[in-house]
Image: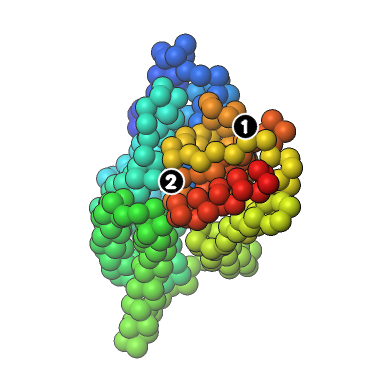
Amino acid sequence: MLRENKRKLFLSSAVILLPVLFGLIVWNRLPGTLITHWGADGNADRTAAKALAVFGLPLAYLLVHLICLWVTLRDGKQARQSPKALGMIFWILPVCSLLTSGMMYRAALGEALQITAIVPVLLGVLFVWIGNYLPKLRQNSTLGIKVCWTLGNEENWNRTHRFAGKVWVVGGLLLLLGALLPLGAMIWVMICVTAALGLAPIAYSYSIYRQHRKEGIAYTPAPRSRAEKITARITAVIVCVILLGTALLLFTGRLEVSCGDTALTIHATWWADLRLAYSEIDTVEYREDLDTGVRTNGFGSAKFSLGTFRNDEFGYYTLYAYTKATEFAVLTADGKTLVIGMEDAEKTREIYDGILARIHR
């Protein structure tokens, strides 16, 4: 089928590489390093050299694009596939390449990005788009809800994909609305919606299978080797572990800052603890406005921003803060900067006052 779709292949591949052309046009305006990833707390946490960001990201998309198309189009059943549904496969990664590269370039050129609002909007639009095409998918072994019940019965496949289409559209709309929520609530919506989009169609397919079994409708067993069965089970376990682990990391943990008699002690659930003697502290100030900059190493979630950061004011510094923090205690010790931001301003002020009183004793 690749020969019949050569024009789409060429055009979609060219679109994936368009960001390279834009990068060359604005090359002299770009900084030496570009932000390529943002954490769940909205902070930039990964950068790349200019050449790698401009050329590497689109080329990586192109490689994945070609692999996905090769796997999809080598399936003989795609010959009877809906042209519209099949066409969607050609354009998902080109769209992703334009969007992610666009965000990268906007940040590099100094444009402010509300990344925590952009991501759910983009995912919502993507889910609505895919949801509109799911009902058009015809039975095959590479696209769609590929479980034994859908592969074993065409009616099950069609009903499941009609249902999945509605679920994905509703899920996408919920994500669009979720972009208006506070960060913590928005991430919960994203996790729950994403899980529902995967699990609800499978559960619905199984319910159809149970109904058919009572009616005596036969299912054709999908030909699967023992290795494929083992792989499917391992994959299911890994997906469950990843979902549970992600929820655990995003929403749990504690940040405790205590002013002892001789030292400041910080305990963070997901990052290294810290102890700083008051005798080592050179200055301390209270800040109500702070650009945290880019995280270069550490941990970021809906709850915490921890680790090593870099901004124009301090250069590299250490941050222990709740994502919601709006006020900070800024300490310097031996030429290094430590910033602390608690969940509420009152607690941050209390820590600041405690440190100030002890270093001036």
Q: Nearer the viewer, residue 11 or 213?
A: 11
Q: Nearer the viewer, residue 56 or 86?
A: 56
| Residue tagged 1 | 316
Please say if 141 is above or below 318: below
Where is residue 314? Give x, y as percent: 58, 29
Q: Secondary structure at mark 1?
A: strand
Amino acid type, label 2: Thr
| Residue 239 visible at all | no
Residue 326 shows which numbered tag?
2
| Residue 114 visible at all | yes
Where is residue 205? Give x, y as percent: 36, 72
Say which quarter of the image contains residue 134: bottom left
- Which residue is painted at 59% across and 28% down in the image? 315
Query: Dot 2: few (<14), some (14–19), or many (≥20) neighbours within 10 Å?
Result: some
- Which residue is painted at 29% across and 63% down in the image? 167
Residue closest to the far bottom:
214
Say which quarter of the image contains residue 155: bottom left
Please say if 40 is above or below 294: below
Residue 229 shows which numbered tag?
none
Say which quarter of the image contains residue 159: bottom left
- Which residue is painted at 34% across and 73% down in the image? 204
Q: Secondary structure at mark 2?
A: loop
Please say if 152 is above or below 185: below
Left/right placement of residue 89 relative to residue 299 reads: left
- Which residue is painted at 31% across and 86% down in the image? 215
Amino acid type, label 1: Tyr
Where is residue 353? Give x, y as percent: 55, 49
